[in-house]
Amino acid sequence: VWILPLPGLWSVRLVASFGLFLLALQIACGDVSYSFPEEMKRGSVVGNIAKDLGIEVGKLGARKARIDADGNSKRYCDINLSTGDIIVADRIDREGLCGKKASCVLKQELVLENPLELHSISVHVQDINDNSPQFKKNTIKFEIGESAPKGSRYRLDEAHDADVGQNAIQGYSIEANENFRLNGGGRKHSELVLVKELDREQEKELKLVLTAVDGGSPQRSGTATIHVTVLDANDNAPVFSQAIYKVSLPENSPVDTVVVTVSATDADEGPNGDITYNFDHLSEDHVSLFSLDHKTGEIRVVGSVDYETETSIELRVRAKDGPGLTSYSTVILDITDVNDNPPVISLKSLTNPIPENVSPGTEVGIINVQDRDSESNRQVRCTIQQGAPFNLVPSIKNYYSLVTTGQLDRELVSDYNITITATDEGSPPLSSSKTVQLSVADINDNPPVFEEQSYSAYVSENNKPGSTLCSVTARDPDWRQNGTVIYSLLPGEVNGAPVSSYVSVNGDTGVIHAVRSFDYEQFRSFKVQVMARDNGSPPLSSNVTVSVFVADQHQRAGCSQCLTKLVSGQIEQLIFVYSMFLRPEVPENVVYTLIPYFFNF
Ligand SMILES: *[C@@H]1O[C@H](CO)[C@@H](O)[C@H](O)[C@H]1NC(C)=O
Ligand SMILES: *[C@@H]1O[C@H](CO)[C@@H](O)[C@H](O)[C@H]1NC(C)=O
Ligand SMILES: *[C@@H]1O[C@H](CO)[C@@H](O)[C@H](O)[C@H]1NC(C)=O
């Protein structure tokens, strides 16, 4: 039996070229063998059996030549009795007949009668490339974690090609891509190899066309889609929208004011991309000032933010994803000033009490004004209550001098309550005031002053020594000893004798006493000088004249004895009393006391 070593189309060509030579061999063997491609049309000539067996064509009909199937097999060939050709009678499908078997031989028999002859005909069915490679499924699914290392391998389903030999699958190829290539060039069975790590965040899924090709001519191919779903790995840390959030926040912002909302994104999915926000190393002071919503990243005011405590606050914020990858951002709060501090007035020094004789323009105090706010909120104007002889003079920086603007007089005003008001230039402005209490200290600037310009004393003669003549009073508005009055007699002479031998004055009360009994016949009147002196140092004094009038006792006695004699003189008496009224140095009450004497009541 001739065995054809070459498969496929090659063999068909060879058969055609060396046909004669081969047929000669077959005759010698008695049986006939043909090589014939599958799927030829009915009626196609496989070979000429008459020639090959050396039978006369004309005798074929007579000998009832016919083709029988060998055994149970089907009859695929027929014989053309007029030419002796073996022709295709039924569809010859190599794959249907032999599957993947490397050689496919169709056994038929030529039956001749008279005499009966049996010739076995072997038709070697040659494969033609009539089947394409085919994958079991159109889609090949993979789920590959993005953390899969380079070099990871993934077995691919093989494609199937019903054809054999060269017409069977010769190789695989994959659509050009960055991540995968086929192992070993895809020659044999196909295996995906990861050549570049996957990144879910860049590409969630890949679709690659896998192609299987056979070696036929023309070549046939089949495709399937490799569908790679990239599974997430927590390979991305959260990323803040800003590395630094700069925010300006007015101090005293009410509780619940939203300061800023920080935000971070995480490219990963699911819990790998779930972000929670927290403060990082927040100082005790700031814990009570700000809150951070773990989910939304909203920072709110929860306490009282004070510009005067801190003008700038830095908060570190941390964003963390589910498995714990972390990133940080900084929130810089620029606190802006609000006019919430009134000026504070402090009295740095004060001369108190102030002597009343200080000259105008004397500095009596130093005042300092502070405002804890800033900018115009700390610009302060100071005013002083009008009406008092004091003024504020701006000095160095925020110092003011309190100076007198006029002459002080303790005897007029001894105490001042001076109100100083400081107002800042905030909007609305805040102000505060302070009252400075000032006392004026006494200076002995007032001499004692007698209530009268002069005094007169009336006494009847033969008075008792030590009797009271009159009293003088001087007033001194100064303070304490500067205003304490001491009376004394100024030295002098009356009728050649010292005045002190006639009268004396009580130094404390100013009451003047007679030292001896006076005699009307000796003198009718005399004058003494009384001095009022204060106790100041140096003391001040003033002098006053006291006139003493002595009245005649006989006249009085006479008057009482001879009232009738005097009646005629009553007009004279009245004129005298009247004249006494006119004398300015004689006080009215003294005149009244004299009347009974004259009229001898
Ligand atoms: C000053 O203030 C004090 C205390 O308030 C008060 O006792 C005093 O009378 C005031 N003096 C004047 C002159 O207003
Ligand atoms: C009296 O005046 C003098 C100055 O003339 C002064 O030094 C003194 O302190 C004053 N005395 C009193 C009690 O005010
Ligand atoms: C009062 O009189 C005395 C003695 O003559 C004299 O020294 C003194 O200056 C006088 N005082 C006044 C205020 O005139």
Image (cartoon, grey):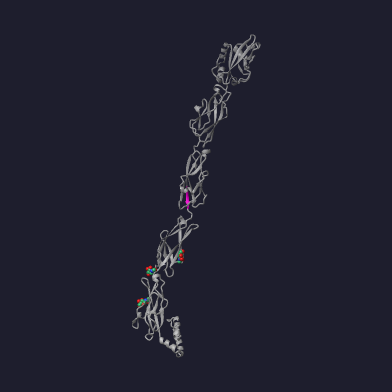
| Residue 180 can be seen in this image | yes
Vertical side of 37 occupied by 203: above or below: below
Q: Nearer the viewer, residue 366 or 81?
A: 366
The magenta stretch spans residue 323: no
Q: Nearer the viewer, residue 499 or 306?
A: 499
Q: Main secondary structure of the magenta part?
A: strand
Provide residue 436's location: percent of width, then percent of height. 44, 63
Provide residue 268's location: percent of width, then percent of height. 51, 38
Locate residue 483: give its quadrant.
bottom left
Where's ligand 2: which quadrant?
Answer: bottom left
Vertical side of 103 occupied by 504: above or below: below
Farthest left residue?
496
| Residue 445 can be seen in this image | no
Q: Nearer the viewer, residue 438 or 522?
A: 522
What is the magenta range? 332-336
Locate residue 364: give its quadrant.
bottom left
Provide residue 461's location: percent of width, then percent of height. 39, 84
Tell me how many marks there are. Answer: 0
Vertical side of 579 occupied by 374: above or below: above
Provide residue 73's location: percent of width, then percent of height. 62, 16
Image quarter hosting the N terminus? top right
Q: Is 163 on the left-hand or right-hand side of 538?
A: right
Q: Nearer the viewer, residue 88 or 274?
A: 274
Q: Is 254 on the left-hand or right-hand side of 91?
A: left
